[in-house]
């Protein structure tokens, strides 16, 4: 791996950590907080591409497992992988990969296309990983866990719009790994 690629991976891992500095919003009826970190997942996949975006999220998970408190609210450690949030957090790696993979196959990445990809993989795929784990951890039926997750949709859609806008602007302005048709850094 090139030094430049390692730098990009480290940068987006740090962005995830920085988004974790924003205090989470806890709701009384679900232990999974509302955070800005799903936007970082969308950005890493959309800007870095599949391989590096997923790698940045995997590094983020490794740091969490090692005890670094990078999640919103200062959470970290192996315990987060045993919490109701575990599935959502693990889904970050897959979401970043598929966002990057899908956007790399589009000829022209517009805000609308990036938004659609962010919703499909940054929201739906992360929910598909998170909802079953949340149901198991809370000992509730899957459909109840699904209902609890609806509260996150409006905020996650706003994050998807912001990420789509930033993805399109950054991809036009900066050399993105694996793409030769952009300006150089």
Image (cartoon, rainbow, N blue to C red):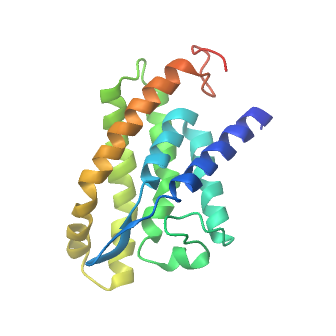
Compared with residue 9, is residue 91 higher up or lower down, i.e. above or below? below
Compared with residue 145, is residue 15 higher up or lower down, i.e. above or below? above
Compared with residue 46, is residue 129 higher up or lower down, i.e. above or below? below
Q: Quadrant of residue 116?
A: top left
Residue at 66% across / 72% down in the picture?
A: 67
Q: Residue furthest bottom?
A: 139
Residue at 39% across / 73% down in the picture?
A: 133
Q: For residue 2, say whether it is visible.
A: no
Image spot of residue 117 (x, y percent)? 36, 37
Q: In which quarter of the image is residue 88?
A: bottom left
Image spot of residue 78 (x, y percent)? 61, 76
Q: Does residue 185 appear to the left or right of 80 in the view shown?
A: right
Quadrant housing the C terminus: top right
Q: Quadrant of residue 174?
A: top right
Q: For residue 161, say whether it is visible.
A: yes
Residue at 74% across / 41% down in the picture?
A: 6
Quadrant housing the N terminus: top right
Q: Does residue 98 appear to the left or right of 51 in the view shown?
A: left
Image spot of residue 137 (x, y percent)? 39, 82
Image spot of residue 18 (x, y percent)? 56, 53
Residue at 50% across / 79% down in the picture?
A: 82
Total marks in image: 0
């Amino acid at each position: 791996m090139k030094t430049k690629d390692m730098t990009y991976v480290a940068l987006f891992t740090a962005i995830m950590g920085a988004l974790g500095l924003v205090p989470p919003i806890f709701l009384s009826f679900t232990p999974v907080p509302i955070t800005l970190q799903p936007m970082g997942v969308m950005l890493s996949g959309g800007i870095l591409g599949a391989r590096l975006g997923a790698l940045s999220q995997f590094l983020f998970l490794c740091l969490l497992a090692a005890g670094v408190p990078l999640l919103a609210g200062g959470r970290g450690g192996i315990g987060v992988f045993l919490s109701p949030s575990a599935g959502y957090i693990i889904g970050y790696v897959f979401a970043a990969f598929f966002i990057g993979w899908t956007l790399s196959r589009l000829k022209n990445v517009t805000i609308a296309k990036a938004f659609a990809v962010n919703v499909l993989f940054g929201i739906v795929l992360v929910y598909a990983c998170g909802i079953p784990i949340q149901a198991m951890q809370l000992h509730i039926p899957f459909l109840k866990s699904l209902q609890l997750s609806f509260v996150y949709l409006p905020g996650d859609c706003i994050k998807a719009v912001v990420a789509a806008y930033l993805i399109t602007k950054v991809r036009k302005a900066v050399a993105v790994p694996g793409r030769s048709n952009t300006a150089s850094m």
